[in-house]
């Protein structure tokens, strides 16, 4: 807006304002509409996000319900939809874990492994990827794939799951009667509150007994 001289009369100032508005009305309309659009756009965005979260939560619950009713095929369809449309959310991760666990209980090991592989490849959360690796290794062990199970455990990231990883690795190797390697795994378990020394001692005693029976 142009500068108003201090010595102008009120009438002159009012006339200048009217003239400025007349010359710049289109710009004012654009600014006003932009401000209104921003407010309504933000509200629409928030509502859309809430609707999307509600949809994902509902679909995740439907997966759980389908599994409780032993409708595994329906659960698989819902999980695939979540993996496709919402792969970066925790909803798809939770649904995938639930489906994989069901496949494991049904002894459909390869299908369970496929679900864990998806989670390992797609999840952006280290803890979730490690959880998938630990569960996948258990599935592979039950499927009589000890080498593959150990390879899976070797891929665990960071130190947060180190104790659980070494304990499971020792159990898998012990079950496969690889006594020397199992002992290394047990002895490599870091001392912490997760796994007591008594647990490690029991495992080593079991290892000794199994060795003597050979």
Image (cartoon, helix red, strand yellow):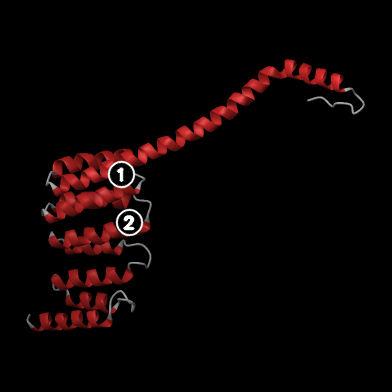
Q: Secondary structure at mark 2?
A: helix
Return the disc, 1 or 2, that comes first in the chain's sequence: 1
Q: Secondary structure at mark 1?
A: helix
Could you say which quadrant of the image residue 101 lies in? bottom left
Q: Which mark, by number, is residue 128?
A: 2
Could you say which quadrant of the image residue 83 lies in? top left
Looking at the picture, does residue 167 appear above or below residue 205?
above
Quarter placement of the N terminus: top right
Q: Residue at coordinates 19% horizontally, 71% vertically from top-left? A: 171
Q: Nearer the viewer, residue 185 or 101?
A: 101
Residue 85, how many percent across, how many down? Answer: 32, 38
Looking at the picture, does residue 124 appear above or below residue 22?
below
Question: How far is disc 1 from disc 2 in space, using C-alphas?
Answer: 18 Å
Write down the residue under mark 1.
57
- Neighbor class of circle 1 (other Cα within 10 Å; few <14, some 14-19, many 20+) is some
Q: Residue at coordinates 16% horizontally, 52% vertically from top-left? A: 102
- Neighbor class of circle 2 (other Cα within 10 Å; few <14, some 14-19, many 20+) is some
Residue 40, how many percent across, how many down? Answer: 51, 30
Residue 56, how many percent across, how many down? Answer: 31, 41
Q: Nearer the viewer, residue 27 or 116?
A: 27
Residue 146, how many percent across, how many down? Answer: 17, 64
């Amino acid at each position: 807006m142009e500068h108003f001289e201090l010595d102008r009369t009120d009438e002159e100032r009012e006339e200048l304002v009217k003239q400025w508005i007349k010359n710049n009305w289109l710009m004012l309309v654009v600014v006003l509409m932009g401000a209104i659009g921003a407010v309504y756009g933000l509200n629409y965005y928030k509502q859309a996000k809430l609707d999307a979260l509600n949809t994902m939560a509902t679909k995740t619950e439907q997966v759980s319900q389908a599994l409780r009713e032993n409708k595994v095929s329906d659960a698989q369809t819902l999980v695939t939809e979540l993996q496709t449309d919402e792969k970066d959310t925790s909803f798809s991760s939770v649904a995938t874990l639930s489906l994989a666990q069901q496949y494991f209980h049904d002894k459909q090991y390869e299908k369970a492994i496929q679900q864990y592989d998806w989670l390992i490849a797609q999840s952006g959360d280290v803890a979730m990827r490690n959880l998938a690796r630990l569960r996948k290794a258990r599935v592979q062990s039950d499927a009589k794939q000890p080498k593959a199970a150990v390879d899976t455990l070797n891929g665990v990231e960071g130190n947060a799951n180190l104790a659980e990883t070494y304990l499971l690795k020792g159990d898998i190797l012990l079950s496969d009667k690889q006594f020397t390697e199992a002992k290394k795994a047990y002895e490599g378990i870091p001392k912490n509150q997760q796994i007591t020394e008594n647990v490690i001692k029991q495992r080593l005693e079991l290892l000794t007994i199994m060795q003597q029976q050979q």
